[in-house]
């Protein structure tokens, strides 16, 4: 699809985002702004136990409270299919028979306002019988461990992976994935040098500023949900399943979304909100607090045991990794995270032998699911740490070692996959230049680079419609959701470019499954590539129709009509699109509908749709007295094929790097026994502006080598993935102390530095939470 | 964060009326000024009150003035108003600087100094500095006015010695004399500081000798603490005091009842006290 870089009118320009003014003036509407006539509000009673049988639920007193319309429990769902899940149908609308984590919704109260619903929760009595719980991967996999899910599950229609479902087969394994090529055992036996280690990447919360919110209405025309979801069509599928309805009777409307980062992928509170509306016989709004949102979805934390081998020439010979993901109580999208973590564990290198085994494990903790980077960040901490470790072991500079081993453009570095469609080698060099790799550094400072490649784009099914109106203005109907990433701006730029109208004349109609054509999802960095291309093709379809119309009104063969920007010409006759449409329809209005469907075919038949690259460098300073690590310099190169909007592309790169830095330095959800202890923003530390590096370099590589419009590829996740390992490697180069766990909290770094001074090994990744062991020690 | 449970706000016109209301409501009522701690706790459903007595409407409680050797800050003066007060900036700049770094802009705009002290949150910046500055508070209840030191006011985490009908009407800080050297430093990772450390010294001979010293730590312990023994190590010739800093930090840590929590282990906090006592000392003598 790639073409020579031509002159662009609208794309490849940093057009101010179309929704900018509405957002900064507070006019943009989000799902929480939706108010329907007669709407009621729901509040949830959540489980205080990690694993317990529900013996009885007494709700009579709550129902009798003034202002309460309905009380919903797991055994009051007669007539609905109470389980949903796009991958594994293990998730009940409300706890059924037992609870599987502290914070699981058990009862919903619907009342005239939020406060009444909340206060009515006090009048509910639930009797539980506690059961032994498994709170870590280790406990969950132990012999004789209590089992979370006793029954087997059919694979969901949108599971996104090809393997069989592992869940419910008598163990707590939710999903496993295995990737092998070559002969890893033989390679390790013959290696010139090997490094080996255990690494831990923490569980994190994506902290979208807007927590989950849904407004649902159930009536004779079906179910309508206004939701903060990323993937309305997959949610529609799940809701249709719960209510036994055809998808045409389920409507998902997604206004602006206040950030997603994967945490709003797939179905969350929509079935429950719709069930509340169904029970209460009126529209219902359910909006969660941040504390509740953390209990709804977090990221999988990961324990990774990895080893890496090189030959005598310093070439990577083999990698082997065993990955345990803590998936929490329900599968959500973790089976796919499991598969992707396995795919991404070896890294973007030329490695002749590999064996990766990944296990997503159910535990009695909050459910884990998609999170920006999607398993890559979890495994890259180990993978990219070990690149530095092995380079050092054989006396090589870590940058030089990467340049010697990184996959070349066009190389098939992962079996049965699209060849590398980016230029990591030149990206690494660019990063090193921006960082000043060879410049001397004072004591207490260190630099590192890192790179990743993620099999991105998900499954390529996307459609779009473009309406060119009688006055030459354009409406784009897109099922992609505007999460703040700027997708509505991108598709408008493409439409303006292709139809030949000013950007301001394009209106983007956002996700509404009753109106906008199908798009699988807004995730996996796929929107620019796939929706962008669908919009481009739909525009071309419209243009081609309008050219034929022009031929009709000019009474000439189509071949004699040549295209010009914004219209056609034939000899001295020039018609813009509004003139073509006015003459064709005989009215000052009328329209042309262009459409496009993308599927896994043609140049999209080989997966991944594209390799999303991450490539960055960091420089840190370390306050050895307090242990505080500060990121003072960051260089990011986004290898995006072609930036439809360079400012937005760079903003995404910076956002992803900053989010990753948060986990690298500060963020970590902590369980103390059954209890998540820091799900409030008072205790969970997200990055602040003051944490941003003093020196920042953002650069783009635009080789037009993607399958997206004009050779574009996706971005927005890549730079999250290698930053934790880069921080760890930079800390090592600053201090000589290597941590195999993030975040690099000051206390943790201080302990490691102290232990190193006393000649103690402080590297192993602790499997128990620090807070807990501290408490035990105290 | 949950919806606030139903409650009533009452707005007394005088201190006496406020005291009457608080006495009348007893356990079900609470004094309310900025609300930045109180409402947060209520939204997290860890505190429940049916009646809030809003003293912001009581006239004369927001003033800030320097008089007779004391800086007097009224009971409903916000952090922000203290931070930008010309009197505070001129007469006690260290306090203005500390106030400028309390929490965040939204908290400073609404939250009051007196409310901060009365909530006795262990991570309070002002309480630690006020302790080292030997500030006092004026209190009024139905039985009349009293004056308390910071130690007397805050005997424990989230505890004050105020009777349920008593209102903190003013914080009074002795104005520094010539030769006072003081600093307040904090170390912060999360929303609340891990450590706050205040050092206030009266010096002689152009700073070459330290006549008296007061040092306080907060956040690392349930409530801000001073140590007389540590302070005695901080008196004398400056080079000698500088050599004593490590030992003083040890003594201070011993007496502080350090706690293990999400901010760090007690041994880490002990270490931080030592680091920050030295930094605070260096800070108090800039340009060396």
Image: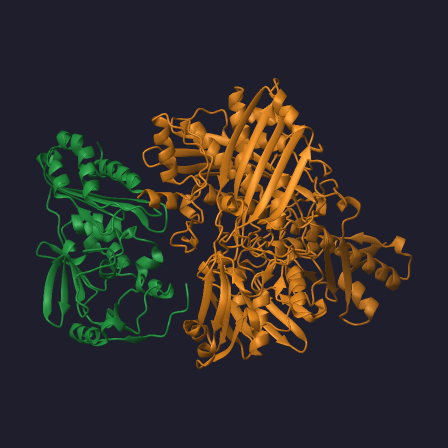
Q: Is the residue A161 above or below the residue A351 in the image?
A: below
Q: Is the residue A629 above or below the residue A206 in the image?
A: above
Residue A596 coordinates in the image, percent (x, y): 77, 56
Identify the image quadrant of residue B28.
bottom left
Q: Is residue A95 left or right of residue A574?
A: left
Residue B16 coordinates in the image, percent (x, y): 15, 74
Q: Give A9 or A102, whichever is nearer the viewer.
A: A102
Q: Quadrant of the N terminus of chain B?
A: bottom left
Q: Is residue A54 left or right of residue A244?
A: left
Q: Give A617 or A93, whichever is nearer the viewer.
A: A93
The residue furthest top is A312
Q: Give A29 or B154, whichever is nearer the viewer.
A: B154
Residue drawn at point x = 26 percent, y = 39 percent? B270
Asked if one can make out residue A434 in the rendered structure from this viewpoint, the answer is no
Residue A119 coordinates in the image, percent (x, y): 41, 73
Q: How many marks?
A: 0
Asked if one can make out residue A260 in the rendered structure from this viewpoint, the answer is yes
Q: Is residue B90 left or right of residue A176?
A: left
Q: Colour in which chain A is shown?
A: orange
Of all chains in the rendering, the one displayed in green is: B
- Here the colouring is by chain
Residue A494 coordinates in the image, percent (x, y): 69, 53
Q: Give B180 or A99, whichever is nearer the viewer.
A: A99
Residue drawn at point x = 62 percent, y = 49 percent? A335
Q: Quadrant of the C terminus of chain B?
A: top left
């Amino acid at each position: 699809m790639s073409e020579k870089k031509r002159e662009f009118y609208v794309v490849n320009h940093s057009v101010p985002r179309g929704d900018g003014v509405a957002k900064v003036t507070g006019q943009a509407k989000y799902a929480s702004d939706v108010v329907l006539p007669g709407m009621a509000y729901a509040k949830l009673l959540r489980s205080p136990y990690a694993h317990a049988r529900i013996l009885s639920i007494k709700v009579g007193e709550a129902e009798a409270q003034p202002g309460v319309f309905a009380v919903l429990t797991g055994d009051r769902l007669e007539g609905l299919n109470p389980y949903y899940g796009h991958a594994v149908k293990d998730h009940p609308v409300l706890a059924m028979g037992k609870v599987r984590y502290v914070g699981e919704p058990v009862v919903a109260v619907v009342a005239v306002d939020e406060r009444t619903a909340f206060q009515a929760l006090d009048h509910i009595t639930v009797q539980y019988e506690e059961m032994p719980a498994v709170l870590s991967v280790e406990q969950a996999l132990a012999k004789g461990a209590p089992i979370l899910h006793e029954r087997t599950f059919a694979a969901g229609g949108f599971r996104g992976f090809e393997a069989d479902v592992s869940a419910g087969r008598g163990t707590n394994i939710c999903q496993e994935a295995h990737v092998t090529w070559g002969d890893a055992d033989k390679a390790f036996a013959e290696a010139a040098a090997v490094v080996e280690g255990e690494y831990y990447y923490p569980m994190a919360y994506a902290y979208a500023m807007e927590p989950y919110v849904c407004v649902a209405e159930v009536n004779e025309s079906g179910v309508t949900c206004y939701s903060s979801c990323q993937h309305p069509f997959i949610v529609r599928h799940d809701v249709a399943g719960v209510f036994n309805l055809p998808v045409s009777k389920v409507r998902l409307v997604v206004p602006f979304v206040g950030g997603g980062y994967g945490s709003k992928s797939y179905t969350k509170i929509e079935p429950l909100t719709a069930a509340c509306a169904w029970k209460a016989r009126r529209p219902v709004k359910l909006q969660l607090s941040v504390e509740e949102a953390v209990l709804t979805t977090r990221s999988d934390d990961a324990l990774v045991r990895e080893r890496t081998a090189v030959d005598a020439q310093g070439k990577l010979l083999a990698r082997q990794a065993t990955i345990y993901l803590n998936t929490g109580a329900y599968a959500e999208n973790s089976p796919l995270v499991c598969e992707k973590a396995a795919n991404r564990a070896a890294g973007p290198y030329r490695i002749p032998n590999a064996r990766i085994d990944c296990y997503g494990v159910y535990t009695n903790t909050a459910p884990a699911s998609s999170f920006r980077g999607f398993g890559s960040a979890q495994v890259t901490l180990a993978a990219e740490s070990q690149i530095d470790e092995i380079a050092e072991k054989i006396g090589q500079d870590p940058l030089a070692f990467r340049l010697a081993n990184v996959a070349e453009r066009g190389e098939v570095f992962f079996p049965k996959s699209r060849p590398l469609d980016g230029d990591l080698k030149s990206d690494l060099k660019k990063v090193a230049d921006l960082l000043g790799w060879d410049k001397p550094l004072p004591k207490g400072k260190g630099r590192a680079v890192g790179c990743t490649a993620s099999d991105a784009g998900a499954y390529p099914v996307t459609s779009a419609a473009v309406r060119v109106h009688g006055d030459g203005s354009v409406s784009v109907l897109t099922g992609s959701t505007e999460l703040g990433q700027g997708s509505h701006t991108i598709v408008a730029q493409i439409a303006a470019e292709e139809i030949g109208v000013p950007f301001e004349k394009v209106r983007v109609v956002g996700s509404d499954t009753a109106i906008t054509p199908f798009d699988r999802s807004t995730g996996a960095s796929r929107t620019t590539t796939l929706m962008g291309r669908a919009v481009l093709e739909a525009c071309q379809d419209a243009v081609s129709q309008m050219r034929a119309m022009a031929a009709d009104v000019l009474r000439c063969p189509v071949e004699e009509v040549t295209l010009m920007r914004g219209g056609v010409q034939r000899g001295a006759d020039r018609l813009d699109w509004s003139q073509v449409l006015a003459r064709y329809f005989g009215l000052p209005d009328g329209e042309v509908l262009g459409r496009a469907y993308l599927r896994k075919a043609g140049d999209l038949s080989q997966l991944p749709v594209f390799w999303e690259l991450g490539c960055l460098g960091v420089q840190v300073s370390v306050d050895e007295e307090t242990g505080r690590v500060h990121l003072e310099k960051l260089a990011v190169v986004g290898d995006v094929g072609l930036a439809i909007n360079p400012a937005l592309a760079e903003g995404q790169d910076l956002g992803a790097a900053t989010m990753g830095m948060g986990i690298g330095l500060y963020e970590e959800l902590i369980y103390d026994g059954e209890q998540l202890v820091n799900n409030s923003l008072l205790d969970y530390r997200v990055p602040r502006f003051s944490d941003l590096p003093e020196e920042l370099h953002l650069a783009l590589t635009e080789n037009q080598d993607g399958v997206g419009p004009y050779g574009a590829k996706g971005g927005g996740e890549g730079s999250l993935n290698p930053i934790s390992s880069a921080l760890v490697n930079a800390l090592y180069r600053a201090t000589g102390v290597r941590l195999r766990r993030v975040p690099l909290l000051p206390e943790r770094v201080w302990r490691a530095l102290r232990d190193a001074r006393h000649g103690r090994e402080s590297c192993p990744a602790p499997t128990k939470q620090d807070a807990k062991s501290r408490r035990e020690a105290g | 964060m949950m919806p606030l449970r139903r409650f009533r706000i009452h707005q007394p016109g005088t201190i006496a009326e406020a005291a009457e209301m608080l006495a009348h409501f007893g356990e079900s009522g609470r004094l309310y000024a900025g609300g930045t701690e109180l409402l947060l706790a209520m939204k997290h459903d860890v505190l429940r009150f049916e009646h809030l007595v809003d003293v912001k409407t009581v006239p004369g409680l927001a003033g800030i003035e320097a008089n007779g050797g004391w800086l007097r800050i009224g009971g409903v003066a916000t952090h922000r108003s203290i931070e930008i007060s010309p009197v505070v900036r001129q007469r006690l700049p260290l306090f203005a600087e500390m106030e400028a770094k309390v929490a965040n802009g939204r908290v400073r705009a609404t939250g009051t100094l007196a409310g901060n002290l009365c909530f006795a949150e262990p991570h309070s910046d002002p309480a630690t500095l006020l302790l080292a500055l030997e500030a006092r508070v004026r209190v009024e209840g139905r039985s009349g006015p009293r004056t308390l030191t910071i130690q007397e006011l805050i005997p424990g985490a989230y505890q004050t010695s105020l009777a349920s009908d008593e209102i903190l009407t003013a914080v009074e800080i002795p104005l520094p004399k010539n030769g006072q050297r003081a600093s307040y430093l904090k170390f912060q990772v999360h929303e609340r500081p891990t450590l706050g450390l205040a050092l206030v010294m009266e010096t002689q001979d152009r700073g070459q000798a330290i006549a008296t010293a007061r040092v306080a730590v907060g956040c690392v312990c349930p409530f801000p603490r001073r140590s007389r023994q540590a302070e005695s190590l901080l008196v004398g010739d400056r080079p000698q005091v500088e050599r004593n800093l490590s030992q003083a930090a040890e003594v201070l840590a011993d007496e502080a009842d350090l706690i293990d929590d999400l901010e760090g282990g007690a041994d880490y906090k002990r270490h931080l006290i030592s680091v920050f006592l030295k930094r605070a000392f260096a800070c108090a003598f800039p340009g060396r």
